[in-house]
Amino acid sequence: MPAAALLETVKSYLPPDRVQFVQSALDHATQAHSQQRRQSGEPYIEHPLATAEHLAAMHLDSTTIAAALLHDVMEDCGVQFKELEDRYGRDVARLVDGVTKLKRMDLLASDDEADTSQPLPEAARAASLRKMLVAMAEDVRVVLIKLADRLHNMRTLQYLPADRQQRIARETLDIYAPLAHRLGMADIKWKLEDEAFRYLMPKEYKAISRLINRKRAEREAYTQRAISSLQEALGEVGVNTTVNGRPKHLFSTYNKMLRYEAQGRKFDEIYDLIALRVIVDSVSACYEALGVVHGMWRPVPGEFDDYIASPKENLYQSLHTSVICHEGYPVEVQIRTKEMHRLAEDGVAAHWAYKEGDHGNPGNDQFEQKLSWLKQLLEWQREMAGDQEYLDSVKTDILKDQVFVYTPAGDVKDLPAGSTPLDFAYRIHTELGHNCVGAMVNGKLVPLNTQLRNGDTVEIRKSRMARGPSLDWLNPNLGYLATAGATAKVRAWFRKQERGANVQRGRDQLRKELRRHGITDTDADIAEMMGFDSVDDLAEALGTGHLGTAQIAEKLGQRRREAMPVKQHAAPPPLENGINGSGIVVMGAQDLLTRVPRCCSPVYGDEIVGYLTRGRGVTVHRRSCPNLRGTDEPDRLVPVAWGHADSMYPARLVLDAVDRVGLLRDITNVVSAEHVNIHSMTSEEEPHTDSCTVSLTVYTTGVEQLSRLFARIEAIPGVRNVSRASQAEHGVRP
């Protein structure tokens, strides 16, 4: 019986009075859930029992085990907080309350909701996740119960409808598995990932399973041979050790295979799927074992990490090295002590394991300091009003991989990978971020959108006068901010400004973007398309950074794609200017030759119109092309539409800039970074000034890519303005 198995486990490490405490909670939960069954048909008590068993296997304290057994009684059985507090103490009641799902919030930690006919809105799920994260920050045991709860539900997901399976699996992969990683709980992390992988990508899951099974016997024989060799060598130098092969996880194997495919390597070549784990008695023995490993097999350059001297942010400690083992195959070796191994598998749960006399207190081993990021969750709770904004910040700033950088005083700050000096400034203090004017990284002045790397020392230059942030910082195309927390602070600053100033700033941005692309839609048309009641509301959203011009360009492109016909005519031969017209459909006609003129060079996503020419088919212009204005033969105008987005389209850009050394190099670097091809480029100096005009023709995939290119080119020092070119001044006629 599962109940008997749980009690046997807790008896193995808890004193009799605490075992009786757990027994009481078990009896209460069994009685409360006696009339309930899961969708699988089994008694509901099986779920809290499985949750508690997983935690008991990690030897957690009796308070956590009791709370795990009772974690659904408030929600599903109507048991009140006061009743739990009176019977089991405030700690148990608080933990149960922390993991209790709000009715109809459907975080799906249970698969037995009372009403599952309607999917819950994202806002409700974000609010529930926010509650769980804040409760976790106040007591980390809340999330330990939640993770065990989620793991059991993932293992019984087959009894739910397909749409709910997908939703739960996606949430597990996006939130719960990264959270387990951040807490150092590797064992539950890979189990959650593999279960989510099964439902999110069933074809890939089966394919990876077959590939691993196909080579299983060969790999196991190779692994055993390597283990025997290493154990023998370690025994000869007197190192007391246990060596075993690390189990392979399907989702991590899938990700590794994707990386290898990108390098042109086959699955059969992935021998570093094999990993050895060496468990020793002391830290000094770890380094002694490392010497033996490197003495036996040649180390792979650049593949050594010392996480003992420099632990990871989730408390993980180990030595990692890759060596060329038997027959020239690379093998990863991890070396750690028994205590490090337990911490690597159970993470923070190891700090709450029962210890005689303290009932699971985390002790004095800098536990709070090492998990300082939990405090950040509480700070954001106070600063951020929106639940979705809060959740986005957690996903970006907490659950992503981290880099560690130093202040000039030597303090370490952890930031998400991809963070910039501006993100660092906002992590130190909001006002420092608002008034940041420059940054020094490792003693060198760098742009504010430079990505930081592990070990960088960052010094922020602050303006002497309060100046506030730049709206450009919110432009994702410019890469100034990578953290959701810093982005939220910049948006909050702009929201506090006067509405009139925000509206005017937004109107200026909108006119500039429309003018760049030659878009003829009115401000009112754009406001309606973006779902705003008035132009002022749209302008305010732009002026506060809540909405970006790139989103408008994306929406315009999406609207035009939806209006495009699926059917298209056969591809005509290449045209005079090298552009093939196969991406354009003449409405109501088939197999008409189309050509793109040089006067306006429409790109995919532009509003276009055709002009019927004698003997040359249809010439396709942007609707705003000056050469179409005042045409005296309107009957020759024909409707046309873009057919597909697979082609590259030319766009002629004109830059007004300060003439300086390195300008053209900077322009070409920016264009290349956007993976855009430059067809031609010219530069003309303005007589008696320091100005120049740079003209270039680039091939883009459409309006969205062009919008990103505009933003990045205009951020180049010395570039005053960039816009689409027209050749009407040359007298070109349709």
Image: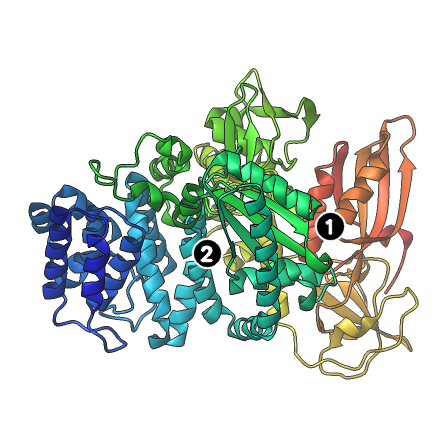
Residue 60 position within the rendered picture, expressed as x and y whole percent measured from the top left: 27, 48
Residue 660 higher or lower than 567, as above or below: above
How far apart are labels 2 and 1 at the CA level? Answer: 28 Å
Q: Which numbered tag is attached to residue 402? A: none
List the residue tagged with mark 1.
674
Q: Residue at x 53, y 28 (%)?
A: 425
Mark 2: secondary structure: helix
Q: Position of residue 532 (x, y in %)?
A: 47, 54
Residue receiving disc 2 = 174
Task: Farthest residue to the top: give it.
Answer: 464
Crowdedness near tag 2: few (<14), some (14–19) or many (≥20) residues, C-alpha within 10 Å: some
Task: Say what amino acid the circle numbered 1 marks.
Answer: Glu
Name the quadrant of the N terminus: bottom left
Residue lying at 58% horizontally and 72% vertically, measured from the top left:
217
Rendered residue at 51%/58% (across/down): 528
Q: Is residue 193 above or below residue 390?
A: below
Q: Relative to residue 467, is residue 674 drawn left or right?
A: right
Q: Tell me if label 2 and label 1 are in contact, CB under 8 Å.
A: no
* Label 1 element class: loop
Q: Is residue 503 visible?
A: no
**Is label 2 or label 1 in front?**
2
Say if 188 sits above or below 431 in the image.
Answer: below
Q: Give percent across and percent down for residue 529.
A: 53, 59
State the image coordinates of residue 419 (x, y, percent, origin top left): 57, 38
Q: Is residue 86 above or below residue 39?
A: above
Q: Name the quarter where the C terminus is drawn.
A: bottom right
Label 1 CA crowd tier, 10 Å (few <14, some 14–19, many 20+): some
Could you tell me which residue is drawn at 85 percent across and 45 percent down? 695
**Residue type of the residue flagged with mark 2:** Asp
In this view of the protein, can residue 636 be seen by the observer? yes
